[in-house]
Amino acid sequence: MQYLVIRAFKCFSIFVQFIKRLLVHCWCRIMFYVKGIQVESFMSLGVPYFHKSLGAKVKIGRNFRMNNGFRYADSGIDGRCRIDVRDSAELVIGDNVGISNVTITCHRKITIGNNVIIGVGTQIRDTDNHSLSPDDRLNGLDWANKATAPVVIGDNVFIGAGVIILKNVTIGRNSIIGAGSVVTRNVDEYSMWAENPARFIKHLKHNAN
């Protein structure tokens, strides 16, 4: 009898999860359409947060995957993906990109290549969000005078959990960023960087072709 109850519960849980995923997919489709976000194809576990200003542009390629909340991201920390594209900024995400509870703050331009894995809790920011001048912060010019600079993440990059990538950074293709790193300068392709601030660890093997 206990076996039958367990089997029935599992079947019911699978059905509930299927309905939830269907509703989330429909909700995301509507949200992308209303906000004018171009997405070729995607899968979302849990509901993300998206903000896009009217003058901003967001283009996302095929097979974009989002994990939102502690149920779907293995950090044990509750949260969800938060993508915020302001003013006339541009966010471009390539094909086969996966993110988990990731924050992307785009005030100028962020480009993410193909086949990129971005670990849980990572933050990517192309702005300081605030002016570095105390006078600006006191006189209402904090937002207007904040510094911005593009961020570029190349193809096949693997970014570990809890990484912070700051403005004016290019991460070369096929590179790895270790968990918990703070990336403040450019990363060469085929290399591993880690620590705070992130530093070069080693070169990665690659085919001459």
Image (cartoon, helix red, strand yellow):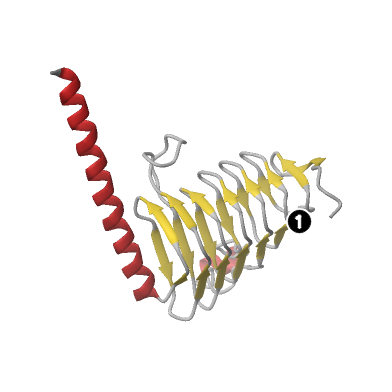
Q: Residue 15: x and y, percent? A: 23, 44
Q: Which residue corresponds to the image point at 51% horizontal and 43% vertical from the top-left? A: 120
The quarter of the image holding the C terminus is bottom right
Quadrant in which residue 35 is drawn = bottom left
Q: Residue at x 48, y 81 (%)?
A: 55
Image quadrant in which the N terminus is located: top left
| Of the pair 113 and 170, the residue shown nearer to us | 113
**Residue visible at 67% across and 53% down?**
156
Q: Is residue 94 above or below residue 98?
A: below
Quadrant of the rendered image containing residue 94: bottom right
Report whether 120 appears left or right of 185. Answer: left
51 vs 4: above or below? below
Let me know if residue 54 appears in the view. yes
The image position of residue 158, as x and y in percent, is 64, 47
Q: Residue 40, relative to residue 101: is it above or below? A: below
Q: Residue at x 27, y 48 (%)?
A: 18
Q: Residues within 10 Å of mark 1 (few under 14, many from 20)?
A: some
Res 139 visible: no
Residue 79: percent from the left, percent from the top? 40, 46
- Residue that label 1 marks: 186
What amino acid does circle 1 point to? Asn
